[in-house]
Image: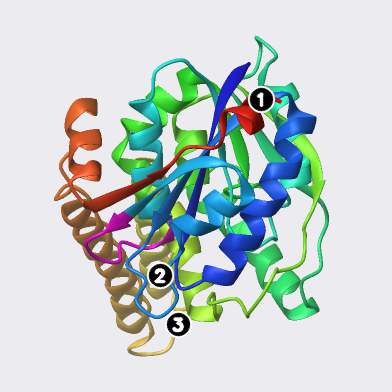
Amino acid sequence: MSLVAIVTPVYEDQESFAELCRHLAEVEKAAGARFHVIAVDDGSLAAPPKAAALREAGVSGEILRLARNVGHQGAIAIGLARAAAMPNLSACIVMDSDGEDTPESIPGLLRAVADPKADVAVAERAKRSETMTFKAFYAVYKRLFKLLTGQVLRFGNFMALSPVAIERLSGMYETSTHVAAAVVKAKLRRADVPTDRGVRYAGTSKMNFPSLVLHGMRAVMVFSDLVLTRMALALVAMAAAVVAVVAIAVAMRFLGMTTPGWVTIVTGFALSLFLQTGLFTMITLIVSSLGRVDTPPKVRERALEYIARTERVEAPVSAAAE
């Protein structure tokens, strides 16, 4: 029976995690695989996930208690680093623990990633339940993201990874910034699997509008090299436009087609705009160069250093063998 790791970040969502474990126990039989849950407790204090939830559901797994809160994407990266160390792993599922990523979609993702032509199978939302305001902002964001990076990002964290994809993503520092963008950055072969978004098991989402904006900005940060290249090209185009504007203004001045002071105003405005854009590009380049690219072993080792302790649960032999 194949072994599949289920990486899920959990933050102050004890009740939802317990419900997720019960659903995973049901899906495990239908998937024809043995699940091993890697729940990353992202510094929960009030309602941390309990190992008893795994035991009561009859699912094998472990809870990684982090020494501090590292954020949703950072928690997933730590879970992937742990999954990469597991022997004989056939695939890895990355999903949220709140129920919006439905366990019933896992068999479809596993079938898609089993194709030798696919390294990762991502859940492409076939049906969305967001408000019109969110959809409007999301549409603007997608176009802005395409303009800045030249890339298209139409999926989230719910995905199935092959062993090759696990090894590559767990060794990329970009994964802790934005998992979905890291998949694109890694140039992994992708299969899109239509899935519907589920309903939260309990409580309310902790993701607010500022958090969504930050999440979107982090996706752009993964492609900082492409953004800088496009900004440099835009700067060159602006320089050419400034030269053209100044030349036209001077020509119009000699032809007597302007009022006194008009050429000075136009030239000053064009040069000011060019200098500000150039300064912004330079600052962005300096800031982006401050990040150090580690070798893959160091990325994994540093991720695992956040784990304060691990609580493991083994499912009964009878349940695991079914």
Name which residue lies at 67% across and 45% down: 24
Dot 2 alpha-carbon crowd within 10 angstroms: few under 14, some 14 to 19, many 20 or more: many
Secondary structure mostly seen in the magenta stretch: loop
The amino acid on which the numbered mark 3 sits, given as a three-letter code, is: Thr
Label of residue 249 in the image: 2
Residue 159 percent location from the top left of the image: 62, 39
The CA span between labels 3 and 2 is 8 Å
Give the answer, above or below, for where 27 lies relative to 308. above
Residue 115 percent location from the top left of the image: 70, 14
Label 1 belongs to which residue? 33
The CA span between labels 2 and 1 is 72 Å
Residue 60 is left or right of residue 118, and the answer is left
Residues drawn in magenta: 65-72
Residue 108 percent location from the top left of the image: 78, 32
Q: Quadrant where the N terminus lies?
A: top right
Picture quarter containing residue 208?
bottom right
Residue 118 percent location from the top left of the image: 64, 18
- Which residue appears farthest toward the top when viewing the image? 116
Residue 144 is left or right of residue 71, and the answer is right
Q: Earlier in the sequence, mark 2 or mark 1?
A: 1
